[in-house]
Image (cartoon, rainbow, N blue to C red):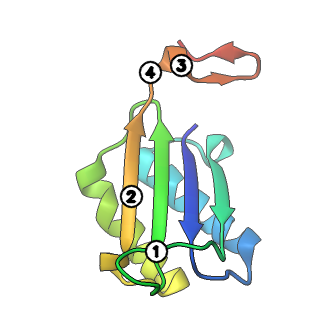
Amino acid sequence: MPYINVSTSEKIEDKKRLLEEISILISSLTNKSKRFVMAKLDDDSEMYFDDESPCCYLEIKSIGSLNSSEMAKPICNFIYEKIGIPLDRIYISFEDVSASMWAWNGKTFG
C-alpha cells in the first residue's frame, strides 16, 4: 500500500517504465516507501468521456497519507507529460482505507 490503478484510452508503449515512474511519484506524494507501492495499468481501454478523445481514470488507495487537494495537480501533470492527456480529461478517485481493511503478508495492517 498505496495502490494506484491507471486506466487510459491511450496505448502505452513502455508500460514498465510508466508503472515504475508513477510508483516513484506516489511514493513521494504519500511519503511511503516505493517498496510498498503497487501500480496497475490498463491501457488502450475503450473509454468515453463526453466524446472519444483520449482520457484517463486513476484510482489511488492508501492507509492514510492521502492529501487529495495537494496530490491532484502533480498526478494530472504526470499523466499529461507522460501520456499527453489534457488535465480536463483526467479523473482521479482517492480512497483512504482503514488499516484493518488492508492486508499484506498474511495479516492486516491494523
**Marks 3 & 1, CB-CB < 8 Å contact:** no
Question: From what the image shows, is residue 102 above or below residue 45?
Answer: above
Tell me if 9 is positioned left or right of 104 in this view: left
Question: From what the image shows, is residue 63 above or below residue 84?
Answer: above
Q: Give the residue pinned by disc 4.
A: 98
Q: Amino acid at mark 2?
A: Ile
Q: Give the residue pinned by disc 2.
A: 92
Mark 3 burial class by Cα count in 10 Å: few <14, some 14-19, many 20+? few
Q: Which of the two marks, 4 or 1, is nearer to us in this view?
A: 1
Question: From what the image shows, is residue 33 above or below residue 104?
Answer: below
Q: Give the residue pinned by disc 3.
A: 101
Location of residue 97 by image quarter = top left
Query: How far separated are the C-alphas under marks 3 and 2?
Result: 21 Å
**Marks 4 & 1, CB-CB < 8 Å contact:** no
Identify the mark at residue 48; answer none if there is no mark.
1
Query: How far separated are the C-alphas under marks 3 and 1?
Result: 32 Å
Q: Residue at x 58, y 37 (%)?
A: 1
Location of residue 90 by image quarter = bottom left
Count the labels in the image: 4
Mark 4 burial class by Cα count in 10 Å: few <14, some 14-19, many 20+? few
**Marks 4 & 2, CB-CB < 8 Å contact:** no
Q: What is the secondary structure assignment of the residue under circle 3?
A: helix
Q: Amino acid at mark 4?
A: Ser
Q: Residue at x 61, y 67 (%)?
A: 21
Q: Earlier in the sequence, mark 3 or mark 2?
A: 2
Mark 1 burial class by Cα count in 10 Å: few <14, some 14-19, many 20+? few
